[in-house]
Image: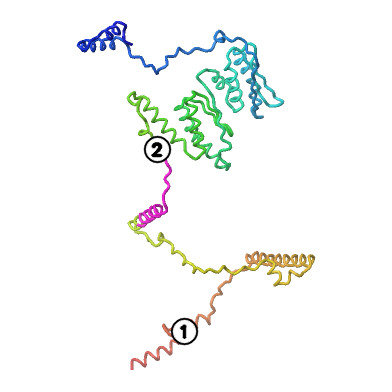
């Protein structure tokens, strides 16, 4: 804003007074603080009081109801008095119906906050989904909201659904703890839903992480991105710049068939080289020979005989039903008899005595001494004949 004295001077200024005009404008700009017109200067936050409601008593009653599972009945009966005490100062009446298994909240003539009924609805929803009352009552705060993410219908296969839901929790709850620390939210995975409590912006981040996890994108990628954003937010120089260059881009790499083959060949070559350096045989790791391709013929293969054709050949087709049954019974009994005989033979093998080699008699020992087997022809000669042959050669 330019002061009124300067504004008057501007109207009466001549071209010769340009230097004085510039100096005056500079002094005026130094005196007045720069105000950002786009920024909204809000008042300090304060809780909604009965005096803030200028309209008075509500003309109509608003109510919400929700069902709860059977296993939550015992806990809800124990803490329902605490739920009543929490909602009573806000003028909200609550009812627990154990017959129909439902909880309901409604406004009364004492209700002064028009939005508190929606907060009460969120409380009974969280209680039905397994959240403790000490945690659920925080939804009544103005800066805390809740979101219940349904994940039951996102994956059809039951085993795959359980594995992906376990990824949100992580080993010993480490992934869930990291999400809670980075988003300042409370997260509870229960059955087919994920209950989240926290600031509005953080609820969007948690919903994105959960839905991406059920679409087979691991939460660690989103956690890494949140950590980088957290560090970038500390630098005031980057407040007006785009952060896309710092954020990681995780994309699935779709390789072509030729690229896959080349990678596979590289791995096999490295494996063969490692075996060669170790002094092992490469033939065991060599590729198996592909079977020879069949010669293409435009004619279809001959039609295979049907079950009826086999029955016609054997004559079974022309038998009467009772004759066919008798034949099947006879064949079954024959197979059973063969199997019984086979089993008996296997059991009898245990009791068959092994063959024992009898000790050689005196005559056998004598024959063994007097006979020798020659090298090539294998004919047996006595020692006397062998001595005669030796003597003949010497002469």
| Residue 259 to residue 375: above or below | above
Q: Residues within 10 Å of mark 2 (few under 14, many from 20)?
A: few
Nearest the camera: 247 or 27? 27
Q: Position of residue 217 (x, y in %)?
A: 47, 39
Q: Which residues are magenta?
A: 250-272
Q: Main secondary structure of the magenta part?
A: helix
Residue 303 within the segment the image draws in magenta? no
Residue linked to disc 1: 371
Q: Position of residue 312 (x, y in %)?
A: 71, 71
Residue linked to disc 2: 249
Asked if the residue under mark 1 is in contact with the one under mark 2, i.e. CB atoms within 8 Å, the reply is no
> Separation of disc 2 and disc 1 at Cα?
92 Å
Measuring 30% from the left and 8% from the top, which residue is drawn there? 7
Farthest residue, direction top: 5
**Image quadrant where one finds the C terminus:** bottom left
Measuring 47% from the left and 65% from the top, which residue is drawn there? 291
């Amino acid at each position: 804003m330019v002061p009124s004295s300067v504004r008057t001077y501007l109207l009466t200024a001549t071209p010769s007074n340009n230097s004085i005009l510039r100096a005056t404008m500079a002094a005026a700009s130094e005196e007045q603080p720069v105000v950002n017109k786009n920024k909204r200067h809000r008042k300090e936050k304060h809780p909604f009081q009965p005096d803030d409601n200028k309209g008075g008593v509500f003309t109509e009653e608003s109510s919400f109801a929700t069902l709860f599972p059977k296993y939550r009945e015992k806990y809800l009966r124990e803490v329902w008095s605490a739920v009543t005490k929490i909602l009573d100062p806000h003028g909200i009446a609550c009812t627990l119906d154990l017959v129909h298994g439902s909880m309901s909240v409604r406004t009364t003539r004492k209700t002064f906050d028009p939005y508190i009924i929606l907060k009460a609805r969120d409380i009974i929803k969280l209680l039905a989904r397994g959240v403790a009352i000490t945690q659920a009552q925080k939804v009544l705060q103005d800066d805390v909201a809740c979101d219940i993410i349904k994940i039951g219908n996102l994956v059809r296969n039951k085993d795959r659904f359980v594995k992906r839901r376990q990824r949100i929790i992580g080993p010993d709850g480490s992934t869930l703890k990291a999400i809670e620390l980075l988003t300042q939210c409370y997260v509870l995975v229960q059955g087919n839903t994920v209950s989240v409590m926290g600031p509005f912006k953080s609820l969007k981040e948690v919903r994105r992480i959960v839905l991406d996890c059920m679409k087979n994108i691991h939460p660690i990628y989103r956690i890494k991105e949140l950590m980088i954003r957290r560090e970038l937010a500390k630098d005031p120089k980057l407040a007006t710049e785009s952060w896309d260059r710092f954020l990681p881009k995780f994309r699935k790499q779709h390789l072509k068939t030729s690229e896959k083959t080349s990678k596979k060949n590289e791995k096999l070559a490295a494996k063969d080289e490692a075996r060669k350096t170790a002094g092992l045989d490469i033939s065991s790791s060599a590729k198996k020979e592909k079977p020879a391709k069949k010669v293409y013929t435009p004619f279809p293969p001959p039609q295979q005989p049907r079950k009826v054709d086999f029955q016609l050949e054997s004559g079974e087709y022309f038998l009467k039903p009772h004759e066919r049954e008798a034949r099947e019974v006879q064949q079954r009994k024959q197979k059973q008899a063969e199997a019984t005989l086979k089993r008996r033979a296997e059991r009898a093998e245990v009791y068959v005595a092994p063959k024992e080699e009898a000790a050689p008699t005196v005559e056998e020992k004598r024959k063994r001494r007097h006979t020798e087997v020659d090298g090539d022809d294998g004919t047996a000669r006595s020692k006397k004949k062998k001595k005669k042959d030796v003597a003949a050669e010497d002469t």
